[in-house]
Image (cartoon, rainbow, N blue to C red):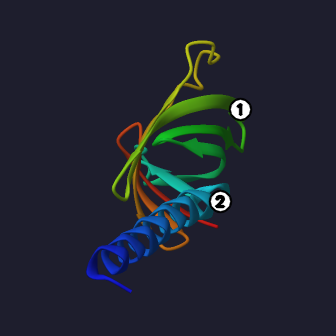
Amino acid sequence: MNTGNRLTIAFLIAFSTGIGNAALAQDSLVGTYSGRMTTPQSNGPATTAIELTISQLEGGVVTAALKRYGNRSCTTSMTGELKEQQLELKSNADAQLGCKFEIKLSRDGNKLTGTANANPLELSK
């Protein structure tokens, strides 16, 4: 086998492995995460149960839905971006009043941590 063929084979293996790893990383983000958002209150911090379902990740574009539980429960559809391990999502324009969220999260394995409307948010798969 000549040097040109070896280089071509090495390139194809490296390229196909990279694509497979990128697809695996994207697929592993898809799923349902649950946890708590902490909001400041005059009588101390309050926690609210949150569920984030990431349904699709394609080309860095993320499609998701967020459910907030409790006395102000609501559901909103969201879209955003994944850059490196940083996820940013915003409620779509049709979100009901009181259910608009802007989320910024860092990914660490099966955990997402960051903020929802500037309030601390921790989620796990």
Can you give x and y, in whole percent of width and height, for residue 61 in the image? 49, 37
Mark 1 burial class by Cα count in 10 Å: few <14, some 14-19, many 20+: some
Residue farthest toward the bottom in the current orientation of the protein? 1
Image quarter in which the N terminus is found: bottom left
Give the mark, 2 or 1, whose residue is nearer the N terminus.
Answer: 2
Horizontal and vertical percent position of residue 57: 57, 45
Residue 97 appears left or right of 103: right
Going by the numbered disc 1, the residue's amino acid type is: Thr
The correct choice, above or below, for 113 with respect to 95 in the image is below
Closer to the camera in the image, 5 or 85: 5
- Identify the residue under disc 1: 75
Amino acid at circle 2? Ser
Label of residue 34 in the image: 2
Q: Quadrant of the C terminus?
A: bottom right
Q: Is residue 68 left or right of residue 90?
A: right
Count of marks, rendered view: 2
Q: What residue is at 41 percent from the left and 65 percent from the top?
A: 15
Q: Quadrant of residue 35?
A: bottom right
Decide if residue 11 is on the left or right side of residue 98. left
Q: Residue furthest left?
A: 3
| Residue 64 image label | none
Q: Position of residue 14 (x, y in %)?
A: 39, 73
* Residue at horizontal 32 percent and vertical 83 percent from the top: 2
Q: Is residue 48 visible?
A: yes
Residue depicted at 27% across the width and 81% down the height: 3
Q: Nearer the viewer, residue 32 or 7?
A: 7
* Foreground residue among 8 and 15: 8
Question: Picture quarter containing residue 44?
Answer: bottom left
